[in-house]
Amino acid sequence: MEFTEVVEKRYSAREYRSQAVPDALLERVLAAVDAAPSAVNLQSFKVVVVTDESKRRRIAELCGPQKWMVQAPVHLCFFADPDNYRAVRGENPRAERLAFQDATIAAAYAQLAATDVGLATCWVGRGLDAPVGKFLGLPQSLKFAVVITLGYAADAPEPRERKGPAAWCIRER
């Protein structure tokens, strides 16, 4: 698929088929995450791949609740890892922000790669203060950023109206 087609086809799916995601496709998505740009190329993020239904159910509760999330056979839980940044670059007041940016850029790459291989996703940022990391047994130093639901869409995307650059682009004068 051409890049512009991937961008145009990506949408937020909230209905998924129960069909499992093949490991080969999941690995392609994770390879795109690995290729995502990051501050000083430190990849200051962690991704937890969750396939267990009971865990997906609990994550859906912590993020809303958003019961539709359970339908997706995979949850990619992205966490910022500011300590990774600090370990290499020293103490920096921007470490938290940079690590969070790393995690969210990586999540966006996951969405685009998933679209490219015929999978659907939805960005779930609700519940940033939810104890998703604690539930997954992660250290407190990792900061929850987003869950990307992943699977085969059961719904069809509805046409989206976009504002266009005239609405949000401020050109240098």
Image (cartoon, rainbow, N blue to C red):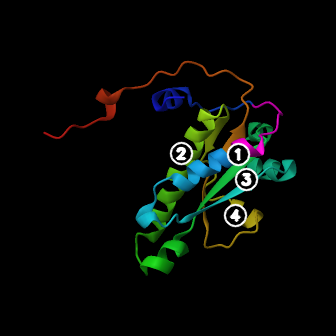
Looking at the rendering, the stretch of residues picked out in magenta corresponds to 16-26
Q: Which mark is residue 26?
A: 1
Left or right of residue 48: residue 99: left
Q: Is residue 159 above or below residue 82?
A: above
Q: Residue furthest left?
A: 173
What residue would you read off at disc 3?
62
Residue 55 is at least partly visible in this image = yes
Please say whether residue 19 is one of the residues in the magenta stretch: yes
Q: Earlier in the sequence, mark 3 or mark 2?
A: 3
Q: Quick one: label 3, few (<14), some, or many (20+) residues within 10 Å?
A: some
Q: Is residue 92 above or below residue 52?
A: below
Q: Are marks 4 and 3 in contact (CB under 8 Å)?
A: no
Mark 3 or mark 1, whichever is nearer to me: 1
Residue 147 is at least partly visible in this image = no
Left or right of residue 132: residue 141: left
Mark 3–mark 2 distance (CA, rounded to whole Å): 21 Å
Give amino acid for label 2: Ala
Mark 1–mark 2 distance (CA, rounded to whole Å): 15 Å
Q: Position of residue 79 (x, y in %)?
A: 61, 61
Mark 2–mark 4 distance (CA, rounded to whole Å): 20 Å
- Residue 83 appears in which quarter of the rendering? bottom right
Q: Which residue is at the front of the view, 156 or 33? A: 33
What residue would you read off at disc 4?
133
Q: Quick one: label 4, few (<14), some, or many (20+) residues within 10 Å?
A: many
- Residue 28 appears in which quarter of the rendering? top right
What residue would you read off at disc 2?
108
Residue drawn at 58 percent across, 30 percent down: 11
Q: Position of residue 140 (x, y in %)?
A: 65, 72
Residue drawn at 49 percent across, 58 percent down: 102
Q: Is residue 150 above or below residue 136?
A: above
